[in-house]
Amino acid sequence: MAEDDKTEADLTGGGLRRRPRHQPLEVGGRRLSPATLMMGHGFDPALSEGSLKPPVFLTSTYVFDSAAAGKRFFEGVTGKRPGGAEGLVYSRFNGPNQEILEDRLGIWEEAEDALTFTSGMAAIATVLLALVQPGDTIVHSAPLYAATETLIGKILGRFGIKWLDFPAGATREEIDAVMAEANASGRVPLIYLESPANPTNALVDIDAVTASRDALFPGEKPLIVIDNTFLGPLWQQPLKHGADIVIYSLTKYAGGHSDLVAGGAVGSKAAINPIRMMRNTIGTILDPHPAWMLLRSLETLELRMSRAGENAAKVCAWLRDQPKVEHVGYLGFLEEGSRQADIYNRHCSGAGSTFSLYLKGGEAEAFRFLDALKIAKLAVSLGGTETLASHPAGMTHLSVPQARKDALGIGDNLVRISIGVENADDLIADFEQALAAI
């Protein structure tokens, strides 16, 4: 029996997992695409009564085949051996649905390891808690999702953790200046990025951040952590540009149906190990049922994102010419030769389906537009099958101080739109009548 074909029972003497350690990634010498692997990678029907799809494993604990197996699994859970438990232990640590999901989640970016969490913010919080110490300085891009800014600036700030930031579109020189200042202030455990930024859609130059980090931190290098929710995993893959950990709100495109809340993190085993230990301790692992739902959703991720992206291109092309529209912050409209276009051409394979719509006027005009929508739903979130529209300044970023919102371009005339998989011409008709209401 080949090593890759052995189950945990073969390798440890008991405690059979619900899946083999590895599944083949190629057939006949051809490496399989993520879209194909989403249909079965990480799951063996023979281990679950021949079920074509993984069952939902609703149990709090797992029976060990032997006391020796139980001890070995706990050595992984407690960190005495890196890599996590080699068998199923207890549902705060691992479970079949979560492990199959994590196997598939890592496929898109060819990541060595992956973890899932109860929400995107649970993923972000667990990663930060695993990496920071009192007195540290976090460097981050701006803007960030409001809850992330609150976590870094207010919550972690209570424990003596400081932060410095640079604008999303910063040049290498601007990034260097902030990095040098942070380095002089003491320990810098991580550089936290969000690209495209929420809600402005501004891109961060991951290549420049990586080069700056490597040049200014010749010793212990801060990890580069990036929230890739807006474009990933289909249209941007930050691990290929030097990022160490990629975070997702799986609620969005990965879930894709606005019916679950979840988060994920992918990266190298070395980067993921301390995060797994923190997740084991504070219990932020995803529940089996939303994990099972995500397995369903990943099967159609490429189809859904592709259709939404095509719709967005058509809708934005129409919106750009409307007299009541000041500007459309869509990645497909970046001026050739500009800094943002350069970043896009190096980092992205698609413009996405979430964009910023700047209306002529202010809050009153934005509210009239939002209230008049008939097909698009007035709701926060993004990446679902349905089109959503919201007002960041008055909703998701309401808690951000006004001066900072002004500096980051989060104005009262900004509407964030996430295009779904409806008929594009129907959406244009909806936006046309909503603009007429302004």
Image: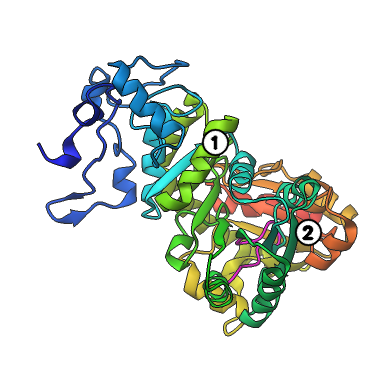
* Magenta: main secondary structure: loop
Q: Residue at x 46, y 45 (%)?
A: 273
Q: Amino acid at mark 1?
A: Arg
Q: Residue at x 48, y 74 (%)?
A: 346
Q: Amino acid at mark 2?
A: Leu
Q: Residue at x 67, y 68 (%)?
A: 168
Mark 2 neighbour density, 10 Å: few (under 14) some (14–19) many (20 or more): many
Residue beneath label 2, please?
414
For residue 151, side relative to residue 113 (left or right): right
Relative to the observer, which residue lies in front, 118 or 342? 118
Percent from the top left, x then y, of residue 261?
59, 34
**In the displayed image of the protein, which residue is found farthest to the bottom?**
337
| Location of residue 301 (image quadrant) | top left
For the C terminus, the image quarter is: bottom right
Relative to the observer, which residue lies in front, 2 or 69? 69
Region in magenta: 191-205
Q: Residue 279's mark?
A: 1
For the N terminus, the image quarter is: top left
From the image, state whether disc 2 or disc 1 is nearer to you. 1
Eyeballing the image, is 204 above or below 297?
A: below
Percent from the top left, x then y, of residue 7?
22, 31
- Check if residue 21 falls in the magenta segment: no
Percent from the top left, x then y, of residue 159?
77, 47
Mark 1 neighbour density, 10 Å: few (under 14) some (14–19) many (20 or more): many
Label 1: element kind: helix
Relative to the observer, which residue lies in front, 279 or 364? 279
**How is the model colour-coded?**
rainbow
For residue 126, side relative to residue 276 (left or right): right
Q: Residue at x 48, y 62 (%)?
A: 238
For residue 46, side relative to residue 399 (left or right): left
